[in-house]
Image (spheres, rainbow, N blue to C red):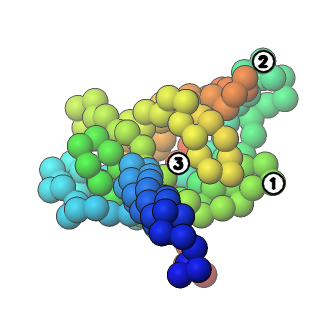
Amino acid sequence: MRSLPVRARLVVTAALMLATFALGWGLARTGLVRVSDPPPLTELEARFTERMTNVVLVGQFTVAGREDRGLREDRYEIASVTKVGDGRWRFVARIVYGSVDVDLPITVTMVWAGDTPMITMTDFSIPTLGTFTARVFFYGDRYAGTWQHDEVGGHMFGRIEAMQAG
């Protein structure tokens, strides 16, 4: 960089600073990094985080307009769930969808209907998977909801089970 003229060095330095800022902002915005201590949890939220640690969502899903093909198997491994902000929760999940098999930290909006937490995603982009809209609620040892991926959507439901070691 010493061989570059002063003006070029300033431009390169400014570009690197802007890129660093943009990367940090993007990581903080997606929830991939923690920018502060996690917020305090209510009793319900604490029970939810405990219930959703090292679990598997095992169930089925439908595809609207293709109900004659029957139910399809659904499976999501959840390592942990952490509250990262007001209404924002990070799920560390293994997602198998089509030919994709990936572990991802996904930060979503959750709302509570009394004692029932519900994920709300609208046109939410998940790296390597695409854009989704979903409403999924959890109660006891069950989950249920609706999902949309581009023009395809349907229902999903199943059980929350402890993840088997190994």
Q: Residue at x 62, y 36 (%)?
A: 131
Eye-nearest disc, 1 or 2: 1
Residue situated in front as seen by the camera: 25 or 60: 25
Q: Residue at x 15, y 56 (%)?
A: 40
Mark 3 to mark 2: distance in Å? 24 Å
For marks 3 and 2, the one nearer the N-term is: 2
Eye-nearest disc, 1 or 3: 1
In the rendered structure, the answer to whether residue 93 lies left or right of residue 118 reads: right
Residue situated in front as seen by the camera: 64 or 93: 93
**Relative image position of residue 54 (x, y in whole percent):** 46, 67
Q: Residue furthest right?
A: 69
Mark 1 to mark 3: distance in Å? 23 Å
Amino acid type, callout 2: Gly
Eye-nearest disc, 3 or 2: 2
Amino acid type, callout 3: Arg
In the rendered structure, the answer to whether residue 67 lies left or right of residue 83 reads: right
Mark 1, secondary structure of its residue: loop
The residue identified by callout 3 is: 159
Residue 20 is at least partly visible in this image: no
Quadrant housing the N terminus: bottom right
For marks 1 and 3, the one nearer the N-term is: 1
Q: Which mark is residue 15?
A: none
Amino acid type, callout 1: Ser
The residue identified by callout 2 is: 65
Q: Residue at x 25, y 38 (%)?
A: 115
For marks 1 and 2, the one nearer the N-term is: 2
Mark 2 closeness class: few <14, some 14–19, many ≥20 residues within 10 Å: few
The residue identified by callout 1 is: 99
Residue 36 is at least partly visible in this image: yes
Mark 1 closeness class: few <14, some 14–19, many ≥20 residues within 10 Å: few
**Relative image position of residue 2 (x, y in whole percent):** 53, 81
**Relative image position of residue 113 (x, y in whole percent):** 28, 30
